[in-house]
Amino acid sequence: MTKEIELDERRAVLLIAKSAFAAAPHADMARLAGVMAEHRPDAVVRYAFIEQGTPSLKEALLALVGEGCSHVSIVPLVLPMEPSVPTWLQKVVRRWRNEDHRPWPEIALTAHIAASPVMAALLGDLVASATSFDLAVDQKSLAEGSLVPDQKRRVLVCQGGPCNGAGADALWCHLRNEQQRLKLRTTGEGTMTAKSTCLGPCNLAPVVQVFPEGTYYGGVTEAAVDRIITEHLLGGTVVEDFAYHPTGRKQRLRPLQTPRFPNP
């Protein structure tokens, strides 16, 4: 086996989608990964989610790093795709690489799916497969009630332009996955999470705000989210390393003592 073939065998394709809450979307992504694997038998093919669902983008990338892949092509299966997505993807991948001591593969992002020359044929096939809605009124659903949750805490993840550009979607994905894993809705005082429009301190991006205290957190990373969950949401103590309190004066991000590793 030649060295060139060995390198090809360590190439990877990573399909990414926004969210998956139920089994069906996971099955869809697994099916698409299977289709890609048939098309690219020389590559490792995986999938991940960038807003909610497992594996997250970070989990999938770290797994491929651990497998010694030499090149990873990220394929965004996202429609529509905001112009900020390539920017924040590059920023968070760079941060994850700098936090990891291992050698990393070359990371590449493919063109947007909407730019594919086969899109017209695909849309035609989808139109041909359309089925009609049943528009009859569902009397059963009208009669059902809803339970008002007993939850004291709210976590808002800013989705303003600067925060999106700084990787807020990756933080949202991590927070939602941890909320599900730790059962935060019913643990402690109960926590609900939500995206928000601009929270204000754009130069502290990405920004998260925790209620009922209204605490602002800036320069938030996945590690910061973990501490906010453990210390603030469950422990009731503000994480001062990432907290920014109203002072009446403009504030800048404070440097964090984050370990940096050389990347060969």
Image: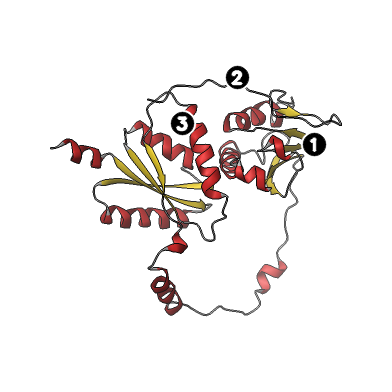
- Element under disc 1: loop
Q: Is residue 117 above or below residue 49?
A: below
Q: Nearer the viewer, mark 2 or mark 1?
A: 2
Q: Amino acid at mark 2?
A: Gln
The answer to whether any part of residue 208 appears in the image is no
Q: Position of residue 6 (x, y in %)?
A: 20, 37
Give the percent coordinates (x, y) of residue 26.
Answer: 44, 53
From the viewer's perspective, is 172 left or right of 107? right
Mark 3 = which residue? 97
Residue 216 place in picture, x, y as percent:
75, 34
Where residue 176 appears, as percent x and y from the top left, is: 59, 43
Q: Which residue is mark 2?
A: 257
Dividing the picture into quadrants, the one containing residue 177 is top right
Give residue 206's quadrant in the image. Answer: top right
Q: Which residue is disc 1 drawn over?
A: 214
- Colour setup of the view: secondary structure
- For the residues labelled 2 and 3, say whether their Cβ atoms are less than 8 Å apart: no
Placement of 38 over or under 10, stated as above or below: below
Q: Nearer the viewer, residue 1 or 21?
A: 1
Tell me how far mark 2 sits from mark 3, CA to CA.
Answer: 16 Å
Quadrant where the image shows the C terminus: top left
Task: Measure the C-alpha gap from mark 2 to mark 1.
Answer: 25 Å
Location of residue 189 with respect to 118 vertically, above or below: above
Residue density around tag 1, few if under 14, some if 14–19, many if 20 or more, within 10 Å: some
Q: Amino acid at mark 1?
A: Gly
